[in-house]
Amino acid sequence: MLTIDEIKNVTFRKGRGYRDEDVDAFIDEVIVSFEQLKKEKSDLVRKMDILATRVEQYRADEETVRNALLSSQRVADTTVKEANAQAATIIAEAEAKAQKMLLEANEVTAKQKEVYLKLKSDASQLRKELAALYNSHLKTIEDLPTDAVVAVEKQKLDKQYPTKPVETQPVQEPVKDTPVETEPVAEEVISQNVEHVVEDTKFADLKFGDNYDVDAE
């Protein structure tokens, strides 16, 4: 491959061919083009170096990112497993607690039902007792005479035992009597009267006065 110096220093043998001015002009153009190509090559090489450096960086970053992704994936898998385990534990505890609460609620409901039915049974028994008491009182009330019965009985009694209306006399104040002196009654008469009364009653066996002998008892 020709260099720029070689192109600049090239010489041709003189002959009857091309003109020197044309050849020199062409050589100058070639030199300019070659220099431009060289400059573009240098730019391309520099850019390629930059791109290569970036590619290396990308590869390094890609490896870092890949490792980070792998670490993140492992962390995510571990987190998911732990979360699933915790969720399973929480669900199991919640189900056990719910089952316990359900059993307790059923027990409370059963007890409340028993209390309610007991109250209903007591109310039914009270209703029967009240009904029996009411019927008893109603029978007693039915046995009592009514005003009509009393009127009929009055008519019967008035017809069977007729009576005349009693005239009421004005009440007179009692006259104060003067004390009357009575003769004393002999004790023998009183004793005879007492003995006569006692003999005719259930107290005939009792002894009074002179007839009672303490030593005889």
Image: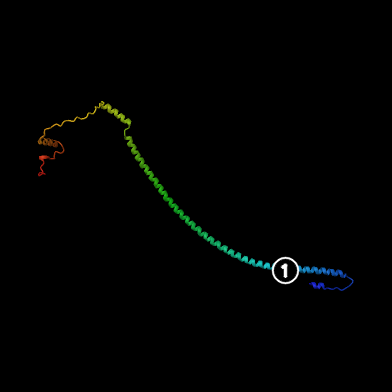
Look at the picture and state if 69 lies above or below 147: below
Q: How is the image coloured?
A: rainbow
Can residue 2 be seen here? The reply is: no
Q: Position of residue 213 (x, y in %)?
A: 10, 42
Q: Position of residue 93 (x, y in %)?
A: 49, 58
The residue beneath circle 1 is 46
Left or right: 155 as drawn, with respect to 61: left
Left or right: 106 as drawn, with respect to 203: right
Left or right: 29 as drawn, with respect to 156: right
Residue visible at 46% across and 54% down in the picture: 101
Q: Of 57 and 95, which appears nearest the observer?
A: 57
Mark 1: amino acid: Arg
Q: Position of residue 65 (x, y in %)?
A: 62, 65
Residue visible at 76% across and 68% down in the picture: 39
Look at the picture and state if 125 lies above or below 86: above
Please tell me in which quadrant of the rendered image residue 62 appears. Answer: bottom right
Q: Of 171 and 136, which appears nearest the observer?
A: 171
Q: Quadrant of the C terminus?
A: top left
Look at the picture and state if 121 lies above or below 196: below
Residue visible at 44% across and 53% down in the picture: 104
Q: Which residue of the protein is positioned furthest toward the right in this rendering?
A: 16
Please tell me in which quadrant of the rendered image residue 51 appears. Answer: bottom right
